Image: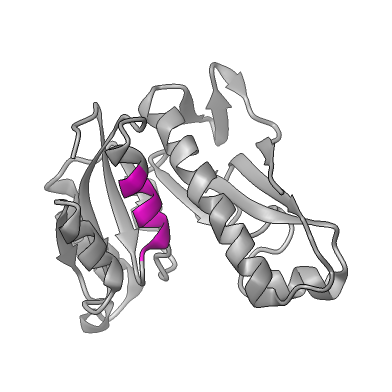
Amino acid sequence: MNKGRCRAAILISGSGTNLQAFIDRAARGNLDVDLSLVISNRPDAYGLERASHAGIETACVEHGGFTDRESFDRALAARLDEHRPDLIILAGFMRILSPWFVDHYEGRILNIHPALLPAYPGLDTHQRVLEAGDHWHGSTVHFVTEQLDGGPRVLQGRLPVNSEESAAELARRVQAVEHQIYPEAAGWFAGGRLRYRDGCAWLDGDRLDEPIVMDFD
């Protein structure tokens, strides 16, 4: 992998499709991020294989052996801190992070959520959008705070909803958008353009009161 000035660790729980988007973008040479470590909380996560094939170091910290969320998070942080990450990317990491973890890495954690936040936090977003008859759907990159799916929004990818498509079809379209906007936002952070300050996201020195929006078909 090409070494960038920003060291990033990616946390996963499953197949790692967003991880693959980062790997592909870095391989093309237009993502100035050193993908230094991929950690999963599940040993059978296929994303670990994706990372290994790309030459990225992998680790597994299984959550089942810990009595509470913070104990797991402290063990996870100990493994992360060996690599001194500048940025932590949540890519399908199916764990709610403890306040301790969020505070430990304040302003350095990005997540992507499959909805146009603040609409539809939580699960089953695609079905909820279809049932509501919404005309637009998409995904949001945001900084992670203690509020679930409530951190400062950075970038949204938006697409029109086809009322006749299934939730699974809509999910596939949204996932394709995620694969474009998530590396883009991480690249802004790596390049020093994006920062978290005073509880807000800042891009190029300006506070983002609303996220940047990119439209897709």
Residue 110, compared with residue 107, is above or below; it is below
Q: Main secondary structure of the magenta part?
A: helix
Residue 121, compared with residue 123, is above or below; it is above
Q: Position of residue 120 (x, y in %)?
A: 71, 64
Q: In the image as oriented, which residue stretches furthest toward the top?
A: 205
Q: Residue at x 49, y 37 (%)?
A: 185
Q: How many marks?
A: 0
**Residue 164 placement, left or right of 142:** right
Q: Position of residue 75 (x, y in %)?
A: 19, 64
Judge by depth and name the residue closer to the eye, 79 or 115: 115
Q: Position of residue 105 (x, y in %)?
A: 34, 45
Q: Position of residue 72 (x, y in %)?
A: 26, 70
Q: Is residue 38 magenta?
A: no
Q: Which residues are magenta?
A: 16-24
The image quarter in which residue 213 lies = top right
The image quarter in which residue 214 lies = top right
Quadrant location of the N terminus? top left
Judge by depth and name the residue closer to the eye, 179 or 123: 179
Q: Residue at x 54, y 45 (%)?
A: 142
The image quarter in which residue 207 lies = top right
Q: Is residue 19 magenta?
A: yes
Q: Residue at x 48, y 27 (%)?
A: 194
Is residue 145 visible from the viewing direction of this image? no
**Residue 205 placement, left or right of 173:** left
